[in-house]
Structures are given as structure tokens and as C-alpha cells.
Image (tube, grey):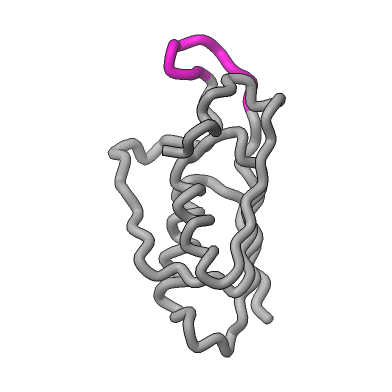
Amino acid sequence: GGGGIHKNNNPHQQKLAVMGFCLGGHPVLEVAKLENPAIRALATFHGVFDGVVDVDTGDDDKTLSSTSNESGTAKAYLPPAEVLICHGVQDPFVSDESLEKALALLQKRNYRTSLLQL
């Protein structure tokens, strides 16, 4: 998954940000599941997170920025990406449960997450 995102092995040459509004909240979480070090920032604004399923990798210690790539050669360390979730507390389309699941998915993957409740 992720198409061309995976083609560049040097994360310092490719820094990406992802933003989603409303239904775009779901794709932002799907991109977060890629755990690609080139993705440096994610943001959702009134994001709907229904239907996002977290896949258990079986590796509880896995972080976003490992120290080796698929070939086993070392790559530069990047701290986890920043995530901003701007949530409307009176938004009838985003349940507390789906918001909590989204936050848990991001926390499990060591994203630095900020929740702004409006």
C-alpha cells in the first residue's frame, strides 16, 4: 500500500503531510497505519473515523521509526510524526467510541497526538 510513498529509502529527502476533513479522517488513519517515516505530520478536522480497523502486527514494540530498512541496512532515525485531531464536541457524526479508537490506534503506533476539542 501507499504507492510511491515507499520508493524513496531516504526519509530526509521525502517529508509528507496528510490532512483530511470530515470523511477525510478515515483515510488519514489508514495512512497512519502505513507507519512510513516519510510521513511527518497528519491532521484531521471534524474527522469521521468509523470503519477503521486496527491490524495487530504481533509486534507490540514496533515503532514508527525503526533503525533498519528491509535490506537490514541502517537508516536515519526520525521521531514519530505529529498528529493533530480537531474534533467538534457537538459533531453528531463522530461518536466518542470512534474517536477513542482513533486515538488508541495512533497511540499504539507511537504518534505524538494532540486533540483539540472545539
Residue 105 position in % (x across, y down): 44, 55
Q: Is residue 76 left or right of residue 5?
A: right
Residue 84 position in % (x across, y down): 65, 60
Q: How many marks?
A: 0
Q: Residue at x 44, y 80 (%)?
A: 95
Residue 99 position in % (x across, y down): 48, 71
Q: Is residue 42 left or right of residue 34?
A: right
Work out which quarter of the rendered image holds the C terminus and state it: bottom right
Q: Is residue 37 above or below residue 45?
A: above
Q: Is residue 51 above or below residue 19?
A: below
Residues in magenta? 68-77
Q: Residue at x 53, y 56 (%)?
A: 28
Residue 100 position in % (x across, y down): 45, 69
Q: Residue at x 41, y 38 (%)?
A: 1
Per the image, is 94 magenta? no
Q: Residue at x 63, y 20 (%)?
A: 10
Which of the 4 quarters of the picture holds residue 61? Answer: top left
Q: Nearer the viewer, residue 13 or 96?
A: 13
Per the image, is 73 magenta? yes
